[in-house]
Amino acid sequence: MPTPSILCDIGNVIVSFDFRIASNRLASRSDCPEDALFDRLHHLKLPFEDGQIDDQTFITQAIEAIGFKDSPAEFCRIWCDIFAPNLALTRTLEQLASSHPLFLLSNTSGLHKDFLFSEFPVFNLFQGGVYSYSAKASKPGTEIFRIAIEHLDLDPAQTFYIDDLLPNIETAARLGFITHHYDLTQHHLLESSLSNWTNQLS
Ligand SMILES: [Mg+2]
């Protein structure tokens, strides 16, 4: 029987993010007005996160789509620099890590995942993870959860899943996970759910 585990989304849970930081910086160095920028990139972003196009293809096509005038390296730096750590959850995870295996489940690209692991030490607390770009499947679909169950050796009934998006929570609940619909502004509600769960375990 697997040990009771925590499975955690990344965006707007472990880190907050704001794509407008990138759109403002990219627009200032491209042919594209800021308010049109994500419309021009929309057809690339989801296939990129689902692993249908690789890093280099995404970067080349995105630069072309918005008429970016700086280097590919600068595009990547701007594209990735949109995150801020959630310090309240970081502290919670630091406490949990001594008693529960921690795993990640995220819709993300390889570029963002690698950036997050290099920038934020909280990601060192995790023993593994499943990411849409490498799983070639994304939440809220069931396939990526099934991949996580198998790959991370999870028992959903013994796994506490944290995500900020309700459709993802609904899929997880349907598959038998213990769930918490996270709100960055209501961190104390996660603390309560977690202590109810850990009390039931003991
Ligand atoms: Mg999220």
Image (spheres, rainbow, N blue to C red):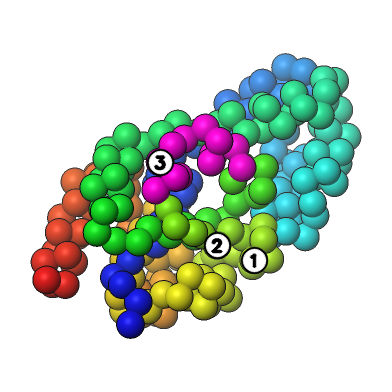
**Closer to us: 122 or 170:** 122
Residue at the spot 33% in from the left edge and 41% down from the top edge: 90
Label of residue 135 in the image: 1
CA gap between label 3 and label 1 equals: 22 Å
Q: Please, what is the three-letter code of the amino acid marked with disc 2?
A: Val
Residue 146 higher or lower than 128, as above or below: below
* In this picture, residue 26 sits left or right of residue 149: right
Q: Quadrant of residue 3?
A: bottom left
- Specify which label sits upstream in the sequence, 1 or 2: 2
Label of residue 130 in the image: 2
Residue 74 higher or lower than 140, as above or below: above
Please rate how many residues cluster around mark 2, counting C-alpha atoms within 10 Å: few if below 14, some from 14 to 19, many from 20. many
CA gap between label 3 and label 2 equals: 17 Å
Q: Tell me, yes or no, whether the highlighted magenta stretch contains residue 167.
A: no
- Coordinates of residue 155 in the picture (x, y in percent): 37, 79
Mainly helix, strand or loop, the magenta region? helix
Q: Which residues are magenta?
A: 114-125
Q: Tell me, yes or no, whether the highlighted magenta stretch contains residue 121.
A: yes
Q: Quadrant of residue 184?
A: top left
CA gap between label 1 and label 2 equals: 7 Å
- Specify which label sits upstream in the sequence, 3 or 2: 3
Residues under numbered marks 1 and 2 in contact, where contact means CB atoms less than 8 Å apart: yes
